[in-house]
Structure formats: C-alpha cells, structure tokens
Amino acid sequence: MLYSTKKSVKKEMQPEKTKIGQEPAESLQTRAELSDILRKKGFRLTPQREKILDIFYELPAGEHLSAEELQKALRTENSDISLATSYRTLKLLASLNVLRELDFAEDHKHYELARNPKSPHHHIICLDCGKTEEFESEEIIRLSEDLARERGFQIVDVQLKLFALCEQHVTEPKAS
Amino acid sequence: MLYSTKKSVKKEMQPEKTKIGQEPAESLQTRAELSDILRKKGFRLTPQREKILDIFYELPAGEHLSAEELQKALRTENSDISLATSYRTLKLLASLNVLRELDFAEDHKHYELARNPKSPHHHIICLDCGKTEEFESEEIIRLSEDLARERGFQIVDVQLKLFALCEQHVTEPKAS
DNA sequence: GTAAGTGCAAAGTGTTTGCAGCGGG
DNA sequence: CCCGCTGCAAACACTTTGCACTTAC
C-alpha cells in the first residue's frame, strides 16, 4: 500500500532509495512521462508495466480500479498479466506516486492516476445505494494544511470521505 | 462493517428494522444507556456484549481498538471471548451506531465509541513512523455539510484522513 | 550475462460463517 | 423452553511471497 504506515514497500523494489510520499510530483503527465518515471528510478519497463500504465492513462478521470478490475480490463484487451504482477505493479506505481491509492469502506483498495497530487479527490458515498461521487475542494485542502501545520505535520495527501444519503434515500422513513 | 455500502448487515441481527446510519443519536451516553440500546432493539444482553461495551466505555476518548486489540484487552481482564464473537459484536454495535468504524490505511478496521456522531474525529497519520493524532474541526464538518448539500446528499459521517510527515520526518533528505 | 521481473501455487491476514450446544428472556 | 448467541473450525476474500524461469538492459 502506498500509505504503508508500518510495513514499508519492498526494498527489492527500490534500487534507488525512494522515500514514500515525498515526491513533489508535477501535474498532468503525458503517457511517455509516466514511463520515464520508472526508467529514471532504475525500474525496468516491462510490457506488463507498460500495459498497466496504458490502462490507467486511458481511464476517464474520476474512475478508479481495484486489482481485480484491473485484471478484467487487461483481459478485455487480451493482455494476460498474473494477479501477482498486477498487485506488485500497483504497489510499485503507488510508491512512486504515479498512482494514488484510495480506500473506501470496502475491503479492497482502488487506484487511480495521481495526475495532480496537490488536489486530491474527495468522495461522497451513499450509504444506501453505494453511489459515489468525486469532487475537489480547495478549501478542504487549505484547511487541512493549516490543521496539519498546527500539529507540526507536513501534508502529503488529503483524503476526505463523506458518508451520506443521496437524494433517493434521504426521504426514506427513519428507523429508530 | 458499519458503512456496508453493498453487503448489508446480517438480517438475523435485525429483529427490528435498523436503517444503518440514520439514528439521530444523542451524545455522551452513560454505560447503562448503551445496554439499553441493545435491549430496546431486541438484542440479548449477553455477558460477552456487556464486557465489550465495558471495554469501549472505559477506553480513553480518542483511543480506538481493532478486533485483535479488543481481544487482547479482553484477555487482560480475564474475559475469554472468541474472535468470532468479537467480530460479530463489533459489527452489531457499529450497525447500531454505538460504535463508529474507522478505517485508516491499514488492512483492518478500528472501532471507538460513537459518543457524539455530530463531531466525528479526524486523523493525521505520519507516513514514516505511523504515529496518528486525532482532532476535531468544526470548519471541516461545516464545509463537508455544504459540499454534500450542494450535491443533494445528507451527511451521516465525515472522515478526514491527513497523510503527512511528522516533525521528526519532514527534515529527512528527499529522495527524487 | 545477470539481476530484475514474471507466473504459479502456496501461504498469509483479517474477517465471516455453518453448526452444535448453551443460556437469556 | 426456545430462539438468539457463542465457540469452534473451516471457509473466505484479498493480498503477499518463495521459487524457478524469463527477459530488459
């Protein structure tokens, strides 16, 4: 996981010391730049990694994939990459800040291109139907940075999850 | 899980229909009121459930336990409750809004007493040492409510996670 | 050529479940 | 006294890993 609070990313994957979450990371890379990030860090550009980068690069902004979903997407394009490699690649790309790792209240992680790490996505999730919407909020980011600074922390990423009821479900009869 | 976006809480556990996350839920209950919540919903007050309520009731505000940690706490007090029952009870209590379910970027969930659902805790987590601090922020809540309203959602819970570097770690040499 | 990367199957983790027996209301 | 609850062990979902083989550089 990107945010490996304890268990750090495998060393074997870090020929050059890579301090997680510290890349300044410019925004909106081109597809070629994504490959460059790998190359520059000394990682090999295997067809599997290229393909996975392709998938994420072509993913509509706001969409995100779990490992399983990535597998499915790969299969659709006739790429047969083992689940193990998918997991390894997702972790690698996340540790390089190429992908952002999201966790909703589900039991698996989702990934998306970290196009612009300075304005992370936030999510609102309907507790009834599971519908999720994404949004940005400069104010949230600014506030978060303040809150962190007050406590002596330097923000790397901000994740806001709003659990809520969407239009169709607010009106339902209350239980208690 | 509390926020079972899809997989709903076991039916067998809901003698009275309980719409997750819709309890208005007053703040700061007494220990006895916690038991009452169970009783009123038709759940049995078993010694196991009482004991688990005790543990959480006596937990310093701001602390939270995972299922494993709960087990350990129980063992310390010579209560031997099976892991299965712990999980079942955590889920039950979360579905009743007695406990709040938190998920950090770790692979297991944490629980705390949902003393006052209207001011949820927020967390700042150091990516290097794993240290986590809690805090409240009225502004975040207010902002979140606005953001939700704009999108036609009604907030049930707000979870903000700030991934950051704490004092000891900001100063470390950058990688890239 | 050689270390890094892959695929496979086996092992882990955290959590859930089927079932027989127990006990709260 | 009966159905909800518990404990146990087996099952699960997701993710990681050891190892032999392959391949990018």
Image: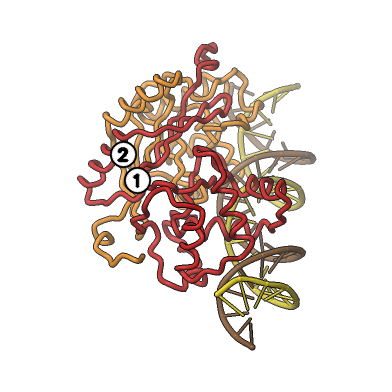
Chain colours: A orange, B red, C yellow, D brown
Label 2 Cα neighbours within 10 Å, binned few <14 / some 14-19 / many ≥20: many
In the image, what residue occupies the spot 33% across and 42% down? A62
In the image, what residue occupies the spot 32% across and 51% down? A164
Residue A22 disc label: none
Residue A174 found in image quarter: bottom left
Residue type at numbered disc 1: Lys
Tag 1's secondary structure? Answer: loop
Instruction: Report whether A169 appears left or right of A76.
Output: left
Residue B4 found in image quarter: bottom left
Q: Which one is in front in this view, the residue at disc 2 or the one at disc 1?
A: 1
Q: Say which of A48 and B94 sits in front.
A: B94
Q: Say which of B65 and D12 sits in front.
A: B65
Q: Is residue B123 above or below residue B50?
A: above
Query: Percent from the top left, x then y, of residue D16?
Result: 65, 40
Query: Percent from the top left, x then y, of residue A92?
Result: 55, 32
Query: Percent from the top left, x then y, of residue A155?
Result: 42, 23
User: Is the Cβ of the residue at disc 2 closer than 8 Å to that at disc 1?
Assistant: yes
In the image, what residue occupies the spot 67% across and 56% down? B83
Q: Which residue is mark 1?
A: B118
Residue A29 can be seen, yes or no: no
Q: Quadrant of the N terminus of chain A?
A: top right
Residue A144 can be seen, yes or no: yes
Q: Is residue A43 above or below residue B159?
A: above
Label 1 Cα neighbours within 10 Å, binned few <14 / some 14-19 / many ≥20: some
Q: Which residue is mark 2?
A: B141
Q: Is residue C19 above or below residue D20?
A: below
Query: Percent from the top left, x then y, of residue B25?
Result: 37, 54
Instruction: Report whether A113 appears left or right of B125.
Output: left
As drawn, the residue found furthest toward the left would be B150
